[in-house]
Image (tube, helix red, strand yellow):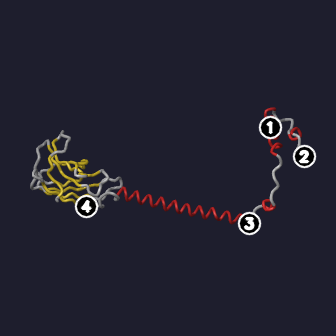
Amino acid sequence: MTPRFDDLIDDDVTAAERERLERVHELLVAAGAPPELSPKLEAGPTLAMTLGKAAKPRGRRIALLAATFAILAAAFMLGYIAGNHGGGLASAQTLQLTGTRAAPSALASLQILPSDTSGNWPMKLTATGLPKLGSRWYYEVFLVRNGKIFAPCGSFVSTGTADVTLNAPYRLQPHDSWLVTKQRWGHHESGTVVLRPTT
């Protein structure tokens, strides 16, 4: 037998709260009594059931954590290789440069050093036999990619010999090369090539 709503509610309940509770009571009466529990559910969980269920998720969590860690470690290594070596030059190399008709006695050695943590490639250029330039002239080292001047790597002045430190702040590729040009102050296009890679 379903109890009457008025028998369940005290007199000190506000009118709004009483109205809300009466709607809930009507819904519960309309839904009816819940079905009877099976004897197995009525007995509740056993110790073996509880321990067995707790062990599985924990083992699964550990396996998931291990897999996640392995994936993160692999991604970090791939990123490190790609950023510092992958698709780029070996960690260090030296390029020999020979003078052109504009500087027939010039010879140079350009050493590309290992990249730093920011991805910059420091370089050291040692040259001899460079023509002496006037006061409004200087030399520029250019990165060459696919046979075309790609970007500048630094400039210097020389009285015939040079020993300068430069920088390639670019992601280098296996077939990149360099050349040295003679530049006039205020002129932005590349000038006369004075040193190119020895063939």
Residue 125 x, y percent position in the rendering? 20, 55
Please, what secondary structure does the residue beneath circle 1 have?
A: helix
Instruction: Decide: few, some or many residues near mark 4? Use Cα within 10 Å; few <14, some 14-19, many ≥20.
Output: few
Name the amino acid type tagged 3.
Leu
Which quadrant of the rendered structure holds the C terminus?
bottom left
Q: Crowdedness of circle 1 by 10 Å Cα count: few (<14), some, many (20+)?
A: few
Residue 28: % across, % down: 81, 43
Vertically, is 145 above or below 67?
above
Q: CA distance from mark 1 to mark 4?
A: 84 Å
Q: Which mark is residue 47?
A: 3
Mark 4: which amino acid? Gln
| Amino acid bearing label 1 | Arg
Q: Could you tell me how far apart the alpha carbons at marks 1 and 2 are, in whole angstroms? A: 19 Å
Q: Is residue 164 left or right of residue 117?
A: left
Q: Residues within 10 Å of mark 3 (few under 14, many from 20)?
A: few
Kindly indicate the quadrant of the structure image that contains residue 59.
bottom right
